[in-house]
Image: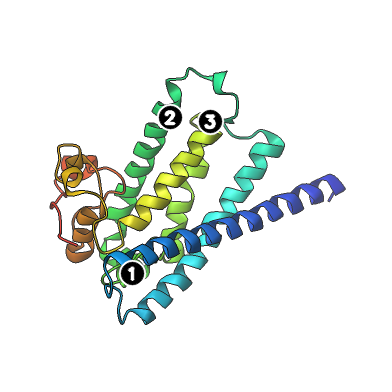
Amino acid sequence: MSDSLISAILAAALSAIAMTVIVGGRYVITSGLFAWITSRVRPGLYHGMGPQIGRELRWSLLSAAIYGIPAGIVAWGWQQRGWTRIYTDVDAYPLWWLPASLLVYLFLHDTWFYWTHRWMHRPKVFAAAHAVHHASRPPTAWAAMSFHPLEALTGAIVVPALVFLVPIHVAVLGAVLLVMTIMGITNHMGWEMFPRWLVHSPLGAWLITASHHQRHHEQYKCNYGLYFRFWDHLCATDRGLSAP
């Protein structure tokens, strides 16, 4: 094995480790922040849930590695080999592509999530993997990444795969990750933080918030989406809102 290949492998491994630390740290900080907000807005909501939160933390930190390793390798490939379609020059594509690419990424991620999520509710797959996530009854702000490794893997490959296929500015990619993080947490907090006028508006009928996702955790066979209710409406799996 040549020295250059060894150096490349070490660099990719270090990038994977660094990204795992970043993903884990992001999870602890953001979930911790929203758990703190919950303690102020809904005091006592998580009372007596210490053992469950402990399980959510352990599964989530394992998921952080599963998300961080491919992300780190892709980040190394982008910076050192130019493998991806991530770009830094705003003028490389028309300006309208900046917001459009954000919506494209969110829609494609949402589509992948909807169909893999429905697959995970097949009895054998549910028992083998997805039951870990549904063991959070009710979910808390710490449950957003509480996945069995198989489920974490299905989620971890989406964005790293898309950056090889769909051009995206690095800042917009950061926005995608921000939306993914915030919605993943807020949808599991057990209470609705978005204003009622939005949740019950015509726009809200197409967006997923805690009121919508809470019903999934209550009834299981409905409300499978991540960001949008498009696929739930189209496939007649939308069962409306709960009242968290």
**How far apart are the two marked residues, 3 and 1, measured between alpha carbons?**
37 Å
Q: Which residue is mark 1?
A: 39
Q: Is residue 143 visible?
A: no
The image position of residue 38, as x and y in percent, is 32, 65
174 lies left or right of 230: right
Label 1 – label 2 distance at C-alpha? 36 Å
Q: Can you name the residue that lies furthest to the front here?
A: 40
Residue 236, given in percent of the width and then of the height, sits at: 14, 46
- Pair 1/2: label in front: 1
Q: What percent of the width, then of the height, locates residue 193?
A: 27, 55
Q: Disc 2 marks which residue? A: 101
Question: In this image, 217 relative to 149: left or right?
Answer: left
202 versus 33 height, above or below: above
Identify the residue shown where x is 15% and y is 49%: 238
222 lies left or right of 7? left
Mark with earlier residue (3, 1): 1
Residue at mark 3: 169
Q: In the picture shown, does residue 205 fall above or below 239?
A: above
Distance between the alpha carbons at the discs numbered 2 and 3: 8 Å
